[in-house]
Image (tube, rainbow, N blue to C red):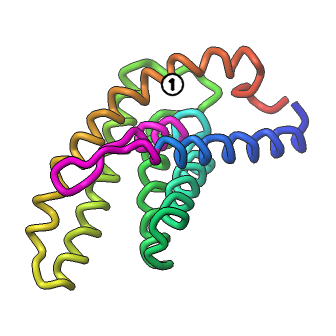
């Protein structure tokens, strides 16, 4: 594949995965003061399929666009969302290895666990800082932690399944092959 074609393909893949993150985030349900959804699974999938940098951009962009269109809570929240979702996919993609190489299931699961826990830690940090500003650091963290762990658990289970279902087709189509 030519270098220019690879750039176009990467742009399309980032856009497609960002759109998937956005759409999956729309389907959520409330639980214990927070919301449960499968967007984190798609963020991890982005890191697995596109690698740390492009996967991080797709995850951060899709989540930030969701926040912008659905909440519009300001630029600071938008940046926090982008950075935390980027970090989740980046950690996952970095630990998983090269997207064009088939990775063992154990490596993929460990990468997903680390990526998901990175997001939970960053989300709890944000919640704690906002709680401290409001005068109560623990109540928001305690109320949001269970849903965050459920989201992380669902993502850790779903992302490797999605990855191992989609990766063979993408590889066969030449999408995940090295540049020649």
Q: In the rendered structure, does residue 54 fall within the stretch colored magenta?
A: no
Look at the picture and state if 23 lies above or below 74: above
Front-most of residues 154 and 108: 154
The image quarter in which residue 33 lies: bottom left
**Quadrant of the frame with the C terminus:** top right
The crowding category of the residue bearing disc 1, from other C-alpha atoms within 10 Å (few below 14, some 14 to 19, many at least 20), is some
Residue 156 in the image: x percent, y percent? Answer: 33, 32
Q: Residue at x 17, y 81 (%)?
A: 132
The image quarter in which residue 76 lies: bottom left
Front-most of residues 40 and 22: 22
Decide if residue 12 is on the left or right side of residue 148: right
At mark 1, the secondary structure is helix
Q: Residue at x 57, y 41 (%)?
A: 20
Look at the picture and state if 65 lies above or below 171: below
Total numbered circles:
1
Q: Which residue is mark 1?
A: 163
Q: Residue at x 34, y 53 (%)?
A: 119
Decide if residue 178 is on the left or right side of residue 54: right
**Quadrant of the frame with the N terminus:** top right
Decide if residue 8 is on the left or right side of residue 98: right
Look at the picture and state if 145 lies above or below 47: below
Residue 129 in the image: x percent, y percent? Answer: 23, 76
Residue 56 in the image: x percent, y percent? Answer: 54, 51
**Residue range corresponding to the magenta coloring:** 25-46
Residue 68 in the image: x percent, y percent? Answer: 53, 67
């Amino acid at each position: 594949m030519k270098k220019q074609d690879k750039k176009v393909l990467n742009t399309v893949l980032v856009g497609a995965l960002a759109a998937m993150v956005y759409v999956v985030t729309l389907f959520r349900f409330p639980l214990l003061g927070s919301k449960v959804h499968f967007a984190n699974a798609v963020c991890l999938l982005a890191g697995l399929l596109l690698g740390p940098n492009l996967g991080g951009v797709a995850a951060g962009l899709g989540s930030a666009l969701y926040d912008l269109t659905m909440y519009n809570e300001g630029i600071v929240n938008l940046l926090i969302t982008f950075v935390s979702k980027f970090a989740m996919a980046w950690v996952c993609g970095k630990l998983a290895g090269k997207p064009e190489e088939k990775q063992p299931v154990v490596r993929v699961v460990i990468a997903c666990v680390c990526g998901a826990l990175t997001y939970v830690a960053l989300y709890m940090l944000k919640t704690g800082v906002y709680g401290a500003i409001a005068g109560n650091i623990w109540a928001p963290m305690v109320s949001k932690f269970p849903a965050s762990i459920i989201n992380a658990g669902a993502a850790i289970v779903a992302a490797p399944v999605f990855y191992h279902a989609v990766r063979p087709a993408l590889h066969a189509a030449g999408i995940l092959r090295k540049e020649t």
